[in-house]
Amino acid sequence: MSGSTGFDVASDGKMSVDLQHLDQLGESQIDYLVQMTFTTLTTGRLPEEQVSEFASEHKIKPKLLKETLKGLLFFLSESLRKNMSGDAVKNELVKFGVDAGKSERIGTLWKTTFTKLAQLMKQKTLKVNELVDLQWKFGVTAATDSLQQVNTCFLQLKLTINKGNETEDVLMEMTLPQFYKFLQQMEQAQRQCESYT
């Protein structure tokens, strides 16, 4: 890939071949395939059953269809990541050798679905590493081998974080000044998150 916009057709040869298979499909078939790709982008799973049914219904080799779908999936996920417009998607597909009419159709479908996909991706991103629980203990050091640390306050935090498929406990111990600095950073982060919503 080159830069932050567009694709490097020369280095993406396999994707180019996969995308050119779109020329063998009719408009309604492309619509269905693009919708299947959008579903895969939002759920994270390729609908294997639907792919098999589509292949048998339209007499397309399943392996060829999966390759085409994977090429389209990669292309559209990168287009989403690069925040490409419908016209840019159309132009890039033409560069990959896809028929102009079919590229236009995919670009139009992209325009109507891009905002929804971007919002869903943002929500999925914010759900990972979500703070689920917080436990804390406050204490005072009563005895230690260092005289300077006696009678100092400390705070122990146990953060439970949602990692997507599982939760992870993160343990921290801080002095009172460290805690106040941490609290200030968390308040700043909260303000920034609120400004994005």
Image (cartoon, rainbow, N blue to C red):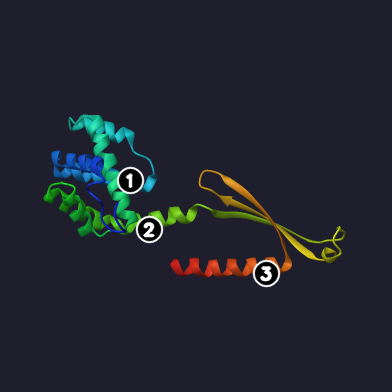
- Tell us which disc is closer to us: 1 or 3: 3
Which residue is most to the front?
Answer: 10
> Would you say the residues marked 1 and 2 are in contact, meaning their CB atoms lie under 8 Å apart?
no
Residue 10's spot in the image, x, y percent? Answer: 22, 47
Dot 2 corresponds to which residue? 119
Residue 100's spot in the image, x, y percent? Answer: 12, 51
- Label 3 neighbourhood size at 10 Å, few (<14), some (14-19), many (20+)? few
**17 relative position to 79: left or right:** left
Which label sits on residue 146? none
Q: Residue at x 33, y 34 (%)?
A: 48
Q: Earlier in the sequence, mark 1 or mark 2?
A: 1
Give amino acid for label 1. Thr
**Can you tell which quarter of the image residue 30 is in?**
top left
Determine whether 127 is above or below 166 in the image: below
Q: Residue at x 73, y 61 (%)?
A: 155
**43 relative position to 5: left or right:** right
> At numbered mark 1, what does the secondary structure look like: helix, strand or loop?
helix
Considering depth in this image, is 22 or 48 the residue closer to the camera?
22
**Can you tell which quarter of the image residue 59 is in?**
top left
Q: Earlier in the sequence, mark 2 or mark 3?
A: 2
**CA gap, disc 1 to disc 2?**
14 Å
Q: Earlier in the sequence, mark 1 or mark 3?
A: 1
Considering depth in this image, is 127 or 140 the residue closer to the camera?
140
**CA gap, disc 1 to disc 3?**
44 Å
Determine whether 14 is above or below 161 in the image: above
> At numbered mark 3, what does the secondary structure look like: helix, strand or loop?
helix
> Would you say the residues marked 2 and 3 are in contact, meaning their CB atoms lie under 8 Å apart?
no
Give amino acid for label 2. Gln
Dot 1 corresponds to which residue? 39
Residue 39's spot in the image, x, y percent? Answer: 33, 45
Give amino acid for label 3. Tyr
Dot 3 corresponds to which residue? 180
